[in-house]
Amino acid sequence: MEIKVLKDIFASNESRAEEIRSLLREKKVYMADFMSSPGSGKTTLLDSVIGRLKDRYRIALIEGDIKTTRDAERLAVHGIPIVQIETSLFGGDCHLESSWIRKCLDDFDLDSLDLVIIENIGNLVCPAEFELGDDERVVVLSVTEGEDKPLKYPLMFNSSHTLLLNKMDLLPYLDYNVDEVMENLRRSNPKMTVFRTSSKTGEGIDEFVKHLARNIEKKRRP
Amino acid sequence: MEIKVLKDIFASNESRAEEIRSLLREKKVYMADFMSSPGSGKTTLLDSVIGRLKDRYRIALIEGDIKTTRDAERLAVHGIPIVQIETSLFGGDCHLESSWIRKCLDDFDLDSLDLVIIENIGNLVCPAEFELGDDERVVVLSVTEGEDKPLKYPLMFNSSHTLLLNKMDLLPYLDYNVDEVMENLRRSNPKMTVFRTSSKTGEGIDEFVKHLARNIEKKRRP
């Protein structure tokens, strides 16, 4: 019984994600979904990424949180269109679903956009289970989080395209083995593209921005 | 329909949690549930805590993970009874439920135990929704995770008793405002007991161990 209902939820979520995929293909808008644990530095990193991209591309942001609009407020300084999903207003869900993303997209003028960024809820588990119709799933993993995370949260790492290994500036103060996390990642998802990043020093941000720009261009002129 | 089923799940989880509470009251066994984001340093911290308590109290461990038995293996060095729940074997759940805890307790000889430690799945959202029948909910929050977490994950902080503000050794290398997180905590749950801890320097561990010991004693001689 429980399983049946869960299947229904997932099936309906996936068919809605397919609709989103078609819509964004037609409108030539690239969509990237950023996921991570709480406190990985996702919002600060998006601040740097949006700052570097906004003069070249027209960006909109969907901001997911259980509670508060703090992240949306932090990113509002860029003057881009933002829609906040605050799940505590309707049950406190731990993830975003495609039907909510569909509603957010209605609030944007897709004909005048190149890129939609989703900042998902801080959770390394459940968001991975819900397709949102995006082109790219980006996982932000902080080097303070331990080397074993790709093995312990396999769906998140298996189903994502890009890893930002973040807070690289803290490496000198940690007993952290980058080779080990890379080896665990290879075992979990050998196809993942990895950038080592730091919002503090700027390391890797330009490289990741170039990667995003290439993907945006590819979708505009397929 | 979905909501009805969810209510059923929660109701059945809570009644099982009540059973566990009665059982542990009768057996005078204290149970503490440790929750956090992935990478907060929970396992390393439990290693220190168990090491300091195991000569005075008889401890058992329930280890929750989606995938891998790595944390259980790390804590097995203490020679205490451990049961691993690996949720990927039955669907990959993002939290622990009371019926599984009940089964784990059957594996222990409760008459010869003082303390059961649960290491919950690394997730600051869903585990808070499921009562497990414990005496104390402990949240481990690393100072690398940002000051806003008590506001952004209200259920986790509202429903817990104790906060371990962890990785205090990293404070000199972070732009982190301890006053701000404490103020956010006061707004979210003013009754929470807070310990500032570091597994690296040992800061706060003895204080937290004393606190646990007091609670264990209280339950043994109510």
Image (cartoon, coloured by chain):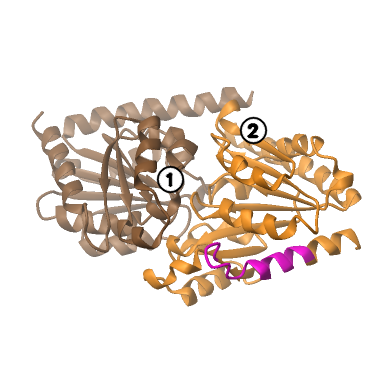
Chain colours: A brown, B orange
Residue A106 located within the stretch drawn in magenta:
no
Residue beneath disc 2? B5
Report the mark closest to the observer, 2 or 1.
Answer: 1
Give the x, y percent position of residue B210. Answer: 73, 68
Q: Is residue A5 above or below residue B150?
A: above
**Disc 1 residue type (three-letter):** Glu
| Residue A83 seen in this snapshot | yes
Name the residue: 59% across, 26% down: B89
Residue beneath disc 1? A147
Residues behind callouts 2 and 1 on a single chain: no
Q: CA distance from mark 2 to mark 1?
A: 37 Å
Dot 2: what SS? helix
- Give the number of callouts: 2
Q: Residues within 10 Å of mark 2 (few under 14, many from 20)?
A: some
**Residue B51 as seen in the image, left or right of residue A118:** right
**Disc 2 residue type (three-letter):** Val
Span highlighted in magenta in the image: B198-213
Give the x, y percent position of residue B159. Answer: 65, 58
